[in-house]
Amino acid sequence: MTAGESNGADELIGTEAPRDPESALARLAGRHAAGYRSVGVMAYDIIREAILDGTLPPGHKLRQETLAELIGVSRLPVRSALIQLESDGLVEFHDRRGAVVKSLSSEQAREVYQLRILLETEALRHSMADMTDQRLARLRELGRTADAKQEGGDFVDARTAFYAELYDAARRPIQWELIEQLRLKVGRYMLGWRLVGDDTHHHSHDELTDAVAAGDVEQAVALLRHHLEGVRDGVLDMLEAESLAKAAPTRRRSRS
Amino acid sequence: MTAGESNGADELIGTEAPRDPESALARLAGRHAAGYRSVGVMAYDIIREAILDGTLPPGHKLRQETLAELIGVSRLPVRSALIQLESDGLVEFHDRRGAVVKSLSSEQAREVYQLRILLETEALRHSMADMTDQRLARLRELGRTADAKQEGGDFVDARTAFYAELYDAARRPIQWELIEQLRLKVGRYMLGWRLVGDDTHHHSHDELTDAVAAGDVEQAVALLRHHLEGVRDGVLDMLEAESLAKAAPTRRRSRS
DNA sequence: AGTCTGCATCTTGGATCCAGAAATCTCGGG
DNA sequence: CCCGAGATTTCTGGATCCAAGATGCAGACT
């Protein structure tokens, strides 16, 4: 009786969803359904993924009970998840009025990429300072798998693993944490950009790994910076498009 | 009316406290008692402050019920607070065994200060690039008040305000957020260091402001870096001392 | 007719209650 | 005398229930 039947989601549509995040989210919940130590982290993962892949668009109101029933748990773990997501900067609490998916302004995006360039180039310098053959081999491997898997969540994981190795996340966990945090802020837009973007910056993995292998620090840093600037521009374009779309929402003339 | 009587804290002493964090925490709770929109953020503030000022030392087990009764609320807002503090990196959850105050290793401290130097010098450069007379005046004002208030929490707030203006937090909120996060990680040790530390680096506020006013970027950056390195060394010394103290805990023979 | 105010409803936030797992204490055996 | 297995106790994590604040609508007053 709690949240049982596989329908139950259909009847709570239309809060103010642009498309229908509910059914998509229910599918996500299904994929994550099994084998979690605590449902709180499950809720966190589901909602986070839903935000990052665009199922829950920026500005969307996150009603606790709806999310709870969709995921199939009580409101309490949902609240935990939302609190975590607030600390992650993905959602925003409005005092007593609930939480909404945080959106990103162009200025914020620019700032994020300034910081990413600063932190990630520095990370790369440090990483290259004590590079080993073993790490290099692992880096090539990870780059290959990242290039191989082009679809969805697997790709994101593989790319994350690549950069974790590139930046020596194991030996510089705090630095990595900051970088991940910044990546998270733009993650929702990065993914959208990837779907529509050209792949001119596509094989930068290989180039970058080559420069790293050659020990050419300046070249590697330049490549990385260039890559990040390219992604930044893509994200900015996407933000532009989105704000334009929001300015003229539904094709409906007010008067003749 | 719910969390009424001002006693109720005295009766639950002695779980496994080294000194007696309970009574001190109860005092903190008293200071924070009035006028909060939600008790969740109150619990967050109280526990956070308790960690930062050393009332709850690193490694201390945080039992939800104890904290709840000490603060005078239920366990639920305490859980919310702990989740937030976990995202802040101040506490650490052990799967099903509760939360403990996270401690900092020397390596982590070193990393934090590497990152702080990187981020804060960059922030200073950007800030100085578009400095105005108005901001400069405000900066001097804040520096004065920070130097004036030498005691406790007020000093921390004043100094934070100074740096917020120095780094132009209003126009670079994400950068400021990262810096604050890093400051938080070492906050508990910085405060302890300040209590025992000499004040050779003490009037760096003035020097720094002077360099900023003169527009001498390299000088200002050098001063800031030097200051941070000094604080870092102090924190490292303190960590050293603490680890030594932990190696020889209580003077108690096991047998005759 | 427009606007302001009061009421009903909805949703969040908090408290109490319940179940499952971990730590500890104890008792029995080696 | 020490070690291990089982039971008890304690604590976390989750669910349900309750109160308070906010939003939206409707009616009345200007």
Image (tube, coloured by chain):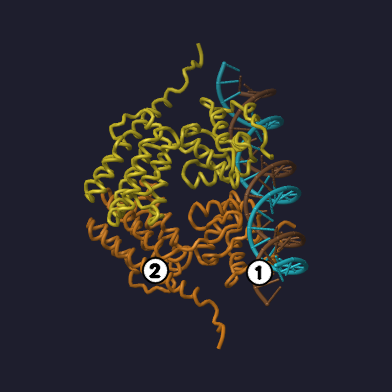
Chain colours: A orange, B yellow, C brown, D cyan
Q: Residues within 10 Å of mark 1 (few under 14, many from 20)?
A: few
Q: Residue at x 42, y 51 (%)?
A: B177
Amino acid at the residue labelled 2: Leu
In the foreground, A251 or B142: B142
Q: Which numbered circle lies on residue A116?
A: none
Q: Chain of mark 1?
A: A
In which quadrant of the rendered view does residue B8 lie?
A: top right
| Closer to us: B64 or A101 | A101
Q: Position of residue B165 (x, y in %)?
A: 36, 49
- In this rendering, would B253 be left or right of A20? left
The reply to whether residue A123 is visible in this rendering is no
Q: Nearer the viewer, residue A41 or B77?
A: B77
Q: Which residue is mark 1?
A: A13
Q: Secondary structure at mark 2?
A: helix
Against A254, residue B65 (above or below) is above
Q: Residues within 10 Å of mark 2 (few under 14, many from 20)?
A: many
* Residue that mark 2 sits on: A236
Chain under numbered label 2? A
- For residue A215, which quarter of the picture? bottom left
